[in-house]
Amino acid sequence: MSNQPDFKLSADSAALVAELRKAVVGNTVSYETLSQIIGRDVQSAASGALQSARHVVQREFRMVFSTIRGSGLKRLNDSDIVDLSDKAREHARRHAKRTARKLICVDYDALPKEKQTKHNAALSMFGVLAEIATDKAQSRLEKRIEDVGKQLPGAKAAMEALGGIA
């Protein structure tokens, strides 16, 4: 018996999956169309159903959609999917920097020893994340992978992104 809870896709999500599966690469499925299919607004009341449907089509059918603000979902081609990494990398870098700025606001000397250790580790970790998520680090890593000809293991990739020898 599995420890995973039994998950049953809602009727709304299943209907949205069926519609999204019809999408051709490069085409947009409008929010209006999706809302009409289930009789609820997928941008508000039924946003969870749409999110579930997007997860299902990505996981089971390898279809990725990007939002077109106020319009709908566009099915991405392979090149567009790869380009999503730039936006995600920049988001991760900004988030790491914001979190580090929050961490330096604590009264460090008032923290118990174990919290000081956790603080230092977190500050170091977010510093590394911010550093390896730069354009320059991406370029270094791309060059190394071009030389090697394959994906690098995580630790070696991090070292290379930081400018070290992997």
Image (cartoon, grey):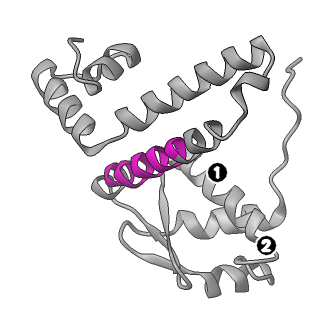
Query: Which is in the foreground here, disc 1 or disc 2?
Result: 2
**Element marked by disc 1:** helix
Location of residue 131 in the rendering, given as x and y in whole percent from the top left corner? 37, 34
Region of the chain picked out in magenta, as a range: 82-97
Please tell me how crowded label 2 is: few (under 14), some (14-19), or many (20+) other residues with Cα within 10 Å: some
Residue 84 colored in magenta in the image: yes
* Residue sitting at x 52%, y 25%: 125
Depth check: give the residue in front, 145 or 38. 145
**Residue denoted by label 1:** 56
Of label 1 and label 2, which has the lower sequence position?
A: 2
Give the overall secondary structure of the magenta segment: helix
Q: CA distance from mark 1 to mark 2?
A: 16 Å
Identified by mark 2, the residue type is Ala
* Vertical relation: 152 (above or below) 18: above
Q: Seen in the image, is 51 located left or right of residue 89?
A: right
* Vertical relation: 103 (above or below) 69: above
* Residue sitting at x 72%, y 68%: 15
Q: Seen in the image, is 64 located left or right of residue 137?
A: right
Q: Seen in the image, is 56 located left or right of residue 97?
A: right
Location of residue 154 in the rendering, given as x and y in whole percent from the top left corner? 40, 19
Location of residue 163 in the rendering, given as x and y in whole percent from the top left corner? 22, 23
Please tell me how crowded label 1 is: few (under 14), some (14-19), or many (20+) other residues with Cα within 10 Å: many
Image disc number at residue 46: 2
In the rendered image, the quadrant that contains the C terminus is: top left
Identified by mark 1, the residue type is Val
Residue 60 colored in magenta in the image: no
